[in-house]
């Protein structure tokens, strides 16, 4: 490398920096971590969905040879006087405290040197409960007399939730409102009114590396090794729980075996911290695949949507009421409620909009973020609804969407302007790839065919901060210090490409440090398609600062501008030997204006717009309802593809995942009990589930303020996919299904409504 | 996992001596896939496992009987061996087709024909197929040797007529001239899943007429179950659409399918009717 | 006697010995006693393939394979696949095709691909999909994995 040889790192499909480690099985995961003296914790869980704990008998378990200690909330209180945590509400106890709020909630932990011994002992614990009636469904929970929490406990970290503090007698954790124009006047002026209620089901992230955390408390400081997407938040929250300064808590994250939004905020970290503090030894808790179903899920929701449309096909009013089933603990549900809430009217230019979005507690496992922060759930509703309107009015579905689509420069319902959002382009590309304007064979006889599409938009979590450090060493080689966690999305590679482009280096030679909060600076979290835009910008700024410092050094050493003397030589001259560093830092927080609490209005509600479209074709066996998605096209606006192959892999992977959420995945509950909590009964997509004709494409709108024009893309293809499939099924069978997932039985019943029992 | 002993006898006699007719915590183990699952979940805590994998000859091999009237499959035969056997491919091609969607390569590498039957799991694909083929098993135990039809092996949900201390040694599938067989694995969620129901049919055609037929329903009930009333509707008749519809109705009526998370009772009854018709049509070349 | 027992086997071509507790799985023994991290338990039910190990040349689910059964066997894991620093052609193909994201399932897919290509040197999509259906990748790098299998097949055939 010389400075004469300008780097070309952007828009290059550079192979993953960590690829070799992964194909040899040597990549580091917390899953494998063992520390000297480490104890394993196994969790005893509630068998009832709602109840007061009368007694927990751990005596038999404690007597098992090899058991070190059995811990309940009473023990936890010895080290954490107020053992409640959570990102939005401090509502989740480290272990059940007097009450259990979902079947599967952790009640006690057995610690042993041998995890098999711990598991054996857990089976000997018994608990007695005074069972309470439970509430399962989000709509019922809105008005139910059964209250999951006696009192709401918003976290101080969100000032906009403070007014909820101390409120009782409700399951509504948060209500979000948006008002734009006058929706009632709009309905009055409309020629047609359409109203539907659609629902989505509970699903789960199922990362292949189940949740795992190790805490190691030594004297006055502690180290957490955890499979987390948000190490900075973990440090802040653990420090708060302990009443320690942040610099006594160290959080280290190697690679993650998948995250998808599940491994965010606090999960096992509070529990292992308390345990390690109690026994003064390292403690590891690694969940089994089955236990993951009790950790965090994706919010089911019920969405009432009503639109007023003029006779020439212009949507002039839309009212949305979205109720989110948050489960027993709020986790990040209130954010999902707000962030998904504000785009609940979809990517359309509608003069009169009202949105009410509610996070409610129920006696189910907690729900959190899952690849889309609620956007896929609401898109299911508004894009099936939009399709139904077009079909009923006899307008081509693509034309209807085009007529109503938001365009750059127009205000979205929140008042924030649409910019750098390629809504037209993604819709047009999906329609083109689907051959929308060409004749379509609808099949005949037993097999009917259908096609459908959808387009969707999302706002990005805001305001959030990323900080990066670029460190050039004495020999000119470069280390990048960031808190972005590479959980498979390829962030190490992309961040290296951005730094390399600025510094004229070869991206594959840059070393990206894995998060260690003692070393790497703050990042809000690897979530919500934010890293490329936020951290990417921070990395760019850090690299630019380093570049400026190198230039300054050149000047200091009387080198002419544009000289090609390498940095190593400059440093050698300055320090007389191979020594020194050039350190650049970058910090980025996008512009943000807090939405008005009564109207949701804001000039800057989101740093950029996530935009995607999908097209699908299906074949339905009308005798059985069994169907096959024969063709699936996802198109995502990526701004600029820093690494085309990696971003395409994100579009593809998210699409297949969402196809699972659309057709095969559903956590089934009966009387508050999960029926199918294992991969034998909860079916995630396998290789045979990938449609034969499966395409993933991006369009480049160029995000003006993104690094080299890039924006985030990790979850965007999850949004339009389900309604595209649903609309294709409707096209085939003539009936829209309103509830996810789309199953053969649901299709069959739609085809044969008169068939009674059969 | 609690302590237990593993014995690996090298002869059947030795294995039988190590098994205990009075102790259900002493179990024979073949490939061990199912047993390991139960042991890890603490559903089954053995005191002694008697591995059959070193017994060899008595439990191995796939052979044609001298008169060519039946195929003997040693109980220790793995599914992969079964799938790759030229004799099975030639005489029982249905088995190869079933294997394509049965579990996965790793399971097929260790799961054995005998263990699969002895497990008594109603969701499995192969037992209903063996029943449709009218297969029988040899069982050896403390009270000697007996042969029973696979149909008589199943007594209920994970229940078999094997006594403690008994071991399945071999399976015999009669080979019938002109017989055809097929199995429909009907899944209702993912394509690769446990079946909501499995429909196994063997029949002997005589022109357009179904000369003989056996129908077995798997997965939808607490054990694989022969649908004799539906068989009686079809036996000796030409396989016309009306008759197949009647047979389907009869099949749904003669069993009591319950709802579960793979489908409501009504839907599964409907699938039974449809797939029975499809399998028979396929076998009759229609 | 019903406690631990000693077993010996060949591990990636070298003699190995272990003391194994009753019911201990092969993947536990490889991880805890040999520090091999390539085979890893995920679903714990033999459904996902993350724990794939080759025993006497056959792929098995290490999470359901009783380690006692490994006595006298030839065990091969992902760690033994590369020749020193030279990756196996299948590993190279996975790298080139970008056939993984988080990497947790990758060793299992690579070992299964090895078995797949031994049995089917020139597999089509249908053969690949059915052979690998028992390996789950939640990141869903499936299209890239199919491409990697085909690339590896071509390279191995060309190499004769």
Image: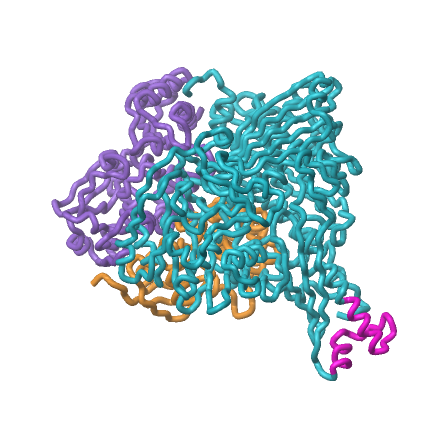
Chain colours: A cyan, B purple, C orange
Residue A449 located left or right of residue C67: right
Q: What is the span of residues highlighted in magenta in the rendered image? A: A547-575
Give the residue drawn at x 24%, y 45%. B170
Residue nearest the observer in this picture, A63 or C113: A63
Residue nearest the observer in this picture, A483 or C1: A483
Number of numbered tags placed on the structure image: 0
Q: Quadrant of the C terminus of chain C?
A: bottom right
Q: Position of residue B68 (x, y in %)?
A: 27, 40
Task: Reply yes or no: does residue B203 show up in magenta.
Answer: no
Residue nearest the observer in this picture, A260 or C21: A260
Compared with B216, A9 (above or below) is below
Residue found at the very far front of the displayed protein? A166
Residue A487: tell me if it is visible. no
Q: Position of residue C132 (x, y in %)?
A: 48, 48
Q: Quadrant of the N terminus of chain C?
A: bottom left
Residue B184 located left or right of residue A687: left
Residue found at the very far left of the displayed protein? B143
Q: Position of residue A142 (x, y in %)?
A: 51, 30
**Quadrant position of residue A652:** top right
Residue A160 located left or right of residue A593: left
Residue nearest the observer in this picture, B67 or A571: A571
Q: Position of residue C24 (x, y in %)?
A: 33, 59
Compared with A101, B271 (above or below) is above
Give the residue drawn at x 40%, y 23%. B266
Residue C18: tell me if it is visible. yes
Task: Reply yes or no: does residue A548 show up in magenta.
Answer: yes
**Most common SS among magenta residues:** helix
């Amino acid at each position: 490398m010389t400075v004469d040889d300008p780097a070309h790192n952007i828009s290059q499909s550079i192979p993953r920096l960590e690829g070799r480690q992964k194909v040899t099985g040597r990549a580091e995961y917390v899953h494998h971590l063992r520390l000297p003296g480490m104890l394993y914790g196994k969790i005893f869980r509630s068998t009832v969905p709602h109840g007061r704990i009368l007694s927990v008998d751990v005596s038999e378990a404690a007597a098992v040879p090899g058991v070190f200690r059995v811990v309940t909330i009473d023990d936890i209180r010895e080290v954490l006087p107020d053992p409640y945590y959570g990102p939005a509400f401090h509502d989740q106890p480290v272990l059940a405290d007097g009450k259990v709020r979902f079947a599967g909630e952790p009640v006690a932990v057995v610690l042993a040197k041998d995890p098999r011994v711990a598991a054996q002992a857990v089976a000997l614990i018994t608990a007695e409960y005074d069972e309470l009636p439970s509430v399962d469904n989000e709509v019922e929970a809105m008005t139910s007399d059964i209250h999951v929490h006696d009192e709401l406990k918003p976290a101080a970290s969100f000032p906009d939730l403070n007014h909820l503090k101390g409120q009782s007698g409700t399951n509504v954790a948060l209500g979000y409102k948006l008002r734009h124009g006058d929706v009632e006047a709009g309905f009055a002026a409309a020629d047609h009114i359409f109203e539907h209620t659609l629902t989505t089901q509970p699903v789960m992230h199922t990362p292949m590396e189940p949740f795992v955390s190790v805490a190691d408390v030594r004297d006055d400081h502690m180290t957490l090794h955890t499979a987390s997407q948000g190490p900075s938040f973990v440090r802040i929250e653990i420090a708060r729980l302990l009443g320690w300064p942040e610099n006594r808590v160290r959080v280290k994250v190697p690679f993650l075996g998948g995250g998808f939004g599940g491994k965010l905020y606090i999960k096992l970290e509070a529990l292992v911290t308390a345990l390690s503090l109690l026994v003064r030894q390292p403690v590891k808790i690694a969940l089994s695949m089955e236990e993951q179903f009790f950790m965090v899920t994706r919010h089911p929701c019920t969405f009432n949507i009503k639109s007023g449309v003029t006779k020439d096909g212009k949507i002039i009013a839309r009212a949305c009421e979205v109720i989110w089933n948050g489960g027993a603990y709020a986790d990040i549900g209130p954010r999902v409620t707000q962030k998904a809430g504000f785009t609940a009217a979809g990517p359309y230019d509608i003069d009169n909009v009202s949105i009410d979005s509610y996070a409610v507690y129920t006696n189910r496992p907690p729900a959190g973020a899952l690849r889309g922060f609620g956007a896929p759930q609401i898109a299911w509703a508004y894009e099936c609804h939009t399709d139904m309107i077009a079909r009923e009015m006899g307008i081509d579905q693509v034309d209807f969407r085009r007529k109503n689509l938001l365009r750059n420069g127009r205000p979205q319902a929140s008042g924030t302007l649409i910019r750098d959002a390629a809504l037209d382009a993604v819709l047009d590309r999906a329609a083109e790839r689907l051959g929308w304007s060409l004749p379509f064979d609808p099949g005949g006889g037993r097999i009917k065919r259908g096609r459908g599409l959808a387009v969707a938009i999302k706002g990005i979590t805001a305001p959030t901060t990323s900080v990066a450090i670029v460190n050039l060493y004495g020999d000119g080689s470069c280390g990048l210090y960031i808190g972005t966690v590479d959980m498979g999305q390829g962030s190490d590679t992309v961040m290296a490409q951005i730094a390399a482009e600025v510094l004229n280096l070869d991206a594959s030679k840059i070393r990206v440090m894995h998060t260690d909060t003692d070393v790497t600076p703050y990042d809000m979290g690897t979530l919500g398609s934010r890293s490329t835009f936020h951290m990417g910008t921070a990395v760019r700024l850090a690299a630019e600062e380093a570049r400026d410092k190198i230039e300054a050094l050149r000047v200091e050493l009387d080198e002419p501008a544009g000289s090609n003397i390498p940095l190593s030589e400059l440093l050698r001259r300055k320090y007389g030997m191979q020594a020194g560093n050039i350190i650049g830092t970058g910090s980025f927080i996008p512009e943000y204006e807090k939405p008005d609490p009564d109207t949701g209005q804001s000039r800057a509600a989101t740093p950029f717009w996530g935009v995607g479209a999908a097209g699908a074709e299906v074949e339905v066996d009308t005798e059985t309802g069994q169907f096959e998605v024969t063709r699936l096209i996802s198109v995502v606006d990526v701004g600029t593809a820093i690494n085309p192959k990696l971003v395409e892999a994100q579009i593809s992977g998210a699409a297949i995942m969402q196809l699972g959420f659309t057709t095969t995945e559903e956590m089934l509950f009966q009387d508050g009990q999960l029926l199918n909590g294992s991969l034998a009964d909860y079916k995630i997509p396998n290789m045979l589930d990938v449609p034969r004709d499966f395409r993933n494409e991006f369009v480049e709108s160029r995000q003006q303020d993104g690094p080299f024009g890039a924006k985030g893309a990790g979850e965007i293809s999850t949004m339009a996919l389900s309604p595209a499939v649903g609309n294709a099924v409707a096209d085939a069978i003539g009936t829209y299904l309103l509830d996810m997932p789309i199953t053969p039985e649901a299709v069959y019943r739609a085809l044969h409504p008169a068939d009674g029992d059969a | 996992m609690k302590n237990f002993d593993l014995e690996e006898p090298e002869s059947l006699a030795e294995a039988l001596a190590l098994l205990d007719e009075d102790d259900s915590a002493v179990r024979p183990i073949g490939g061990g896939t199912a047993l390991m699952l139960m042991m890890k979940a603490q559903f089954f805590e053995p005191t002694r496992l008697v591995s059959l994998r070193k017994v060899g000859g008595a439990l191995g091999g796939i052979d044609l009987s001298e008169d060519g009237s039946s195929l003997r499959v040693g109980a220790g035969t793995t599914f992969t061996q079964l799938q790759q056997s030229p004799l099975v491919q030639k005489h029982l091609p249905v088995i190869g087709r079933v294997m394509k969607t049965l579990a996965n390569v790793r399971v097929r590498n260790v799961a054995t024909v005998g263990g699969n039957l002895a497990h008594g799991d109603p969701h499995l694909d192969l037992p209903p197929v063996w029943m449709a083929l009218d297969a029988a098993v040899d069982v050896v135990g403390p009270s000697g040797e007996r042969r029973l039809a696979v149909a008589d092996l199943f007594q209920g949900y994970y229940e078999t007529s094997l006594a403690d201390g008994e071991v399945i040694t071999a399976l015999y599938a009669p080979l019938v001239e002109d017989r055809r067989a097929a199995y429909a694995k009907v899944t209702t969620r993912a394509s690769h899943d446990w079946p909501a129901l499995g429909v196994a049919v063997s029949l002997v055609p005589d022109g357009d007429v179904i000369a003989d037929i056996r129908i077995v329903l798997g997965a939808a009930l607490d054990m694989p179950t022969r649908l004799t009333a539906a068989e009686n509707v079809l036996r000796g008749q030409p396989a016309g659409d009306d008759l197949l519809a009647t047979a389907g109705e009869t099949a749904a009526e003669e069993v009591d399918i319950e709802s579960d998370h793979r489908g409501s009772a009504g839907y599964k009854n409907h699938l039974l009717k449809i797939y029975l018709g499809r399998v028979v049509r396929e076998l009759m070349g229609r | 006697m019903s406690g631990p027992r000693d077993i010996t086997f060949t591990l990636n071509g070298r003699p190995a010995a272990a003391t194994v507790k009753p019911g201990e799985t092969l993947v536990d023994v490889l991880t805890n006693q040999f520090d091999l991290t390539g085979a890893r338990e995920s679903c714990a039910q033999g459904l996902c393939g993350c724990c794939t190990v080759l025993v006497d040349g056959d792929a098995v689910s290490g999470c359901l394979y009783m380690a006692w059964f490994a006595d006298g066997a030839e065990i091969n894991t992902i760690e033994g696949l590369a020749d020193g620093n030279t990756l196996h052609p299948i590993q190279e193909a996975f790298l080139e095709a970008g056939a993984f994201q988080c990497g947790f399932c990758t060793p299992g897919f690579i070992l299964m691909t090895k078995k797949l290509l031994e049995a089917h040197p020139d597999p089509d999509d249908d053969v690949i999909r059915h052979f690998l259906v028992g390996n789950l990748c939640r990141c869903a790098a499936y299209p890239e994995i199919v491409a990697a299998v085909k690339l590896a097949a071509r390279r191995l055939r060309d190499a004769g």
